[in-house]
Structure formats: structure tokens, C-alpha cells
Image: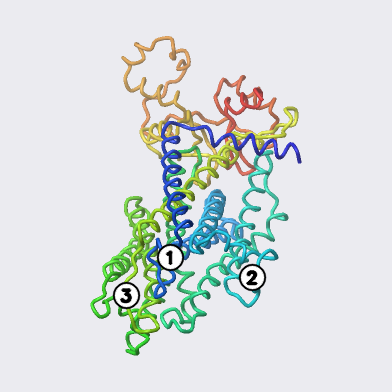
Amino acid sequence: MAHIIGNFFIALRQVYKGTKGYYVWVGSLLLLVLLGVSAYLDQVNRGLIVTAMRDQVSWGFYISNFTFLVGVAAAAVLLVIPAYLYNFKPIKEIVLFGELLAITAITMCILFIMVDMGQPLRVWHILPIIGAMHFPASLLAWDVVVLNGYLAINTVVAFYVLYRLSIGKEYKMSVIGPLILLSIPWAVSIHTVTAFLYNGLSARPYWNASILAPRFLASAFCSGPALMLILFQIIRKLSEVEIDNRAIFKIAELIAYAMGLNLFFLGAEVFKEFYSGSIHSFPIQYLYFGLHGKTALVPWIWFATGANITAFFLFLFPKTRQNFTTLNMACVLVICGVYIEKGMGLVIPGFVPDTLGEIYEYSPSKPEVLVAVGIWAAGALLYTMLLKFAIPIYTGKLRFGIKREGIIAKNIMSKRVLSVTPETPVEEVSKLLISKNISGVPVVDKENKVIGVISESDIIFNEMRREPQLAEKVGDLVMPNMKGDERGPGVHAGDIMTSPAVTADEDTHLKELHRLIMQKKIKRVIVVNEAGHPLGVVSRADILRVLGS
């Protein structure tokens, strides 16, 4: 146990390492967190009077953010099901980052509940054993149980997977399988119970609808994955994690189905409210058209509705959801649309009109906004720290407890394998190597079998064949390697690749890997399975890292 704790703190050191941009990002988030803390301390000192909440509207901006974030947390299940139950490899490779986002979202939910309660000591009342939870009668007590339970499940699964990767081993489904299966209904339960918090208030007709829980889940499976898609693209751009476009496009397709359900449920609710024409339709009239001259939310809800409909059509058609410009546009639209619809668009109309028929137009005060910004910044900071901790382990750069004499390829290989086909243009391969800061990639056929390797050297030699004067300038630096190569300049990867590729299976010993690299005078060995499909790459840097440790 002592060595596990020691290794944990070694991995934790990664959060202190980064580029100048990383330090600016972390510093900016810390500044926003401090602003939020300052505003919260003022709220604690002066009371909830600093907020815009009153007797007429007792839930406001804090609960709106809480409701949205519960959906973000629940949306992790949209990755868990195809990754673990259907073993869809492209999503399975990134499900860990979805689980880390769920941990972050639940933590932010708890913070929003705490600031909404006013005095922090009131939190004691909803804690089990210590406080009086009124379990199982209180729905709030159920919410505490399911939120903390979901946080515990995701934390255990994510850190168990990271632990197994850190010692060079695959995680055991026999260990986390039951937790993964449990997490699926649990993810549904956290948003269902949150919906029941509203649904159970029979005196609030706007919330007292049986369709509310399905609406919550449908909207969660839109906005949460949309946020993940944007984060995955950022992770792919700023780190060495390789995220397959197939994973991104499959998640986008799932969002399209969820968006269709969300809009259908919304349409059914709108029809029921407006067609009945009863006094119970006043809240939705206030939301969409205003009531007695009060129209504060009208432009916001129409923007949200338009954003959701536009996003639905962008996600629906393969041509737009597989184009990153329109895909990202759709993600931003659905995040904004659901944030408004399920936030202020859900909470505030439920209080309009109040029990005396009065209309109090709520708008968050400056302290509320600052506290909310502080919590969002804290969430962004937590997710950043989790990624800085996880990515070196995930990519194989950080390994513990492996004895040198027992090291085999699968312990040290980089598992994020980029590959190209023989038909890939050489220019495109060159751009790929530069953008990913790598020196070569395997070339695979239609059956994903490795048939060669294309490296920086292959591309340089190809340019020399194309421009003989370049070869004359470089001279003996590279020319000896070209002797006996009578190929002309090539256009595609298959024309200039080195074939056959030097490969090894994942059980190949470190000594043999070292011998192959030295004897063949190459920079990397492609690790393949029995079918010849690429599993990873062992580079000279991977071997040096082990020898140096």
C-alpha cells in the first residue's frame, strides 16, 4: 500500500509541469475561483439577501446550474454502454475521459447545492448519520445518496483503470464489471431523482408532469455528450492522446437520436399546456410569450428553442455531423440551448405566478453570477488537474513497479497508434507527422493489417528523388542510405513506404526489442496481434525511458 501511495504522489507531480500556456490557463482559473470565493464569503456574511432569490422565487441561478450539471454527469453513460457492453473500441479508448468529466460535474453539483443552502453549516442536516436526512421520505435525501453514490462509482472505476495502466497491465472486467453495470441505472437515477424533486411539488403545475423525468434524460444525452465532443477535440489537439474520428462521429450520431427525443417530449408538453388553455398554462405562457407585460425570459427561451432545432438538423445529417466546423457549431448550440431550457427556463416559470397570483421577475444578482463563475472555474481546474494526472499514465509515459528483466512490449508500448493506408497522399502523411510530433506511422491495408512503415526518412528521400539538386546539397549525409533504391518519386504512402515493416508481438521481451532496433537501425517497432493488426508502437524513446528509470 505504501508504494501505491508513493506512486500516486509521483503521478500527482505531473500537475505542476506544463507549458507557459498551461500556467496561464491554471492562473486564470485560480483568479476566477478566488473571485467566486470572495463573493461566497460575502454571501455567508450577509446572507442570501445578496442574491435575487425571494419568497416568490426561492430557487434561482444556483439550482439552474445544478440541474444542467446533473445531466452532464449522467451523460457519461452514453460512452459507458458502447465502450464496455458493446466493446466499441474507438469509444472504449476515451471512456476514461468521460468518467473524469462525470466526477467533475458531480463535484460541481455538490458545490452549487452548498452555496444555495446559504450557511455552510446547514450541509450537516443532509448528511447521513451525522444529520437528519429524513431518509427515505425526503427526495432531497435520495438526491444526496444517488449523487454521492455516482461520484464514488466513477471515482473507483477511473482510478482502478489508471492504477492497472500505471503498472503496465490491463484492467480486469471481473473487478469493475459489476460497478460498470451498476453505473448505468445509477446514471439514469441521478437525473430521475432530480426530476422528481421538481415533479413532486404538486402545487407547481409547470413541474408536476410525468414527462419531466424523460425530458431531463433526453436533454442530458444531448448537452453532456456535446460538451464531451468539444473537450475530446481539445484533448486531442493539446496532448498525445489519439482520439479516433469514428468515436467522435458515433457520439454525434447518438446525440442526434437524443435530440429528436428531446424535441418530441418538449413538443408534447407544449401541446398539452397550450391546448388545455387552463390557468395551469400560465407558467409556459410567461416563458414563451410573457404574462401581464412580464417578458424577461421570452428572448432567452426562443433563442434556446431555435438553437436546439438548428443543432438537431446539424447532428441529423451525416454530412454536417462529420464536418468539424458544423459539428462544433451544433455542439455549442445544443449546450447553450439545453443550458437555458433546463436551467432558468425550467426553474423560474415554475414560480410564476406565485401562490398569490403575483409575478416576480427573477434575474441573478452580481454575487450569484460571481459565485457561479467561481464554481465553473473550479470545475474546469479540477478537470484539468485530473487530465494532467491521467494522460501520462494513459499514454504509457508513466509506469511503476515493472522490473526491467520482466518488461515486455505491452508494458511500455504507446497504445495510441496512428496509421495510414497505401492510398494516403504523401503530403497528408507529412502534415500528420508534423502535427503529431512523431517520426513515422504504420501503413495498413483494408483489413487493418500492417504492410509497411512510412517515416520522415522515406519522405525526405522521396523529395530528393523529385528534386535531384536537393540530394547534391545534402550529399553524404543521407545518400548512402539511398544506394540500391531505384524507385522514382511517389505520390502515395504505398509508393514510398518501407516494406515489410519490422513488427513484434506484445509479449516480445525488452532485450529483443532493443536488438531489433539496433540491428535494423530503425526508430520504432510496430506491435501487432496474431492477425497483424497494430496494437501499439515501441520507440527508442520508450526503451530509453525504461533503461533510465
Of helix, strand and loop, which one carries label 1?
Answer: helix
Marker disc for residue 331: none
In this rendering, would 223 be left or right of 141?
left
Q: Residue at x 69, y 38 (%)?
A: 167
In this rendering, would 188 be left or right of 269?
right
Crowding around mark 3 (Cα neighbors within 10 Å: few <14, some 14 to 19, many 20+) is many
Which residue corresponds to mark 2? 133
Disc on the earlier residue, 1 or 3: 1
Crowding around mark 1 (Cα neighbors within 10 Å: few <14, some 14 to 19, many 20+) is many
Which residue corresponds to mark 1? 64
Q: CA distance from mark 1 to mark 2?
A: 23 Å
Q: Nearer the viewer, residue 12 or 221?
A: 12
Q: Quadrant of residue 360?
A: bottom left
Q: Quadrant of the N terminus?
A: top right
Q: Nearer the viewer, mark 1 or mark 2?
A: 2
Q: CA distance from mark 1 to mark 3?
A: 15 Å
Which residue corresponds to mark 3? 287
Amino acid type at mark 1: Ser
Of helix, strand and loop, which one carries label 2?
Answer: loop
Q: Residue at x 25, y 80 (%)?
A: 292
Amino acid type at mark 2: Met
Disc on the earlier residue, 1 or 2: 1
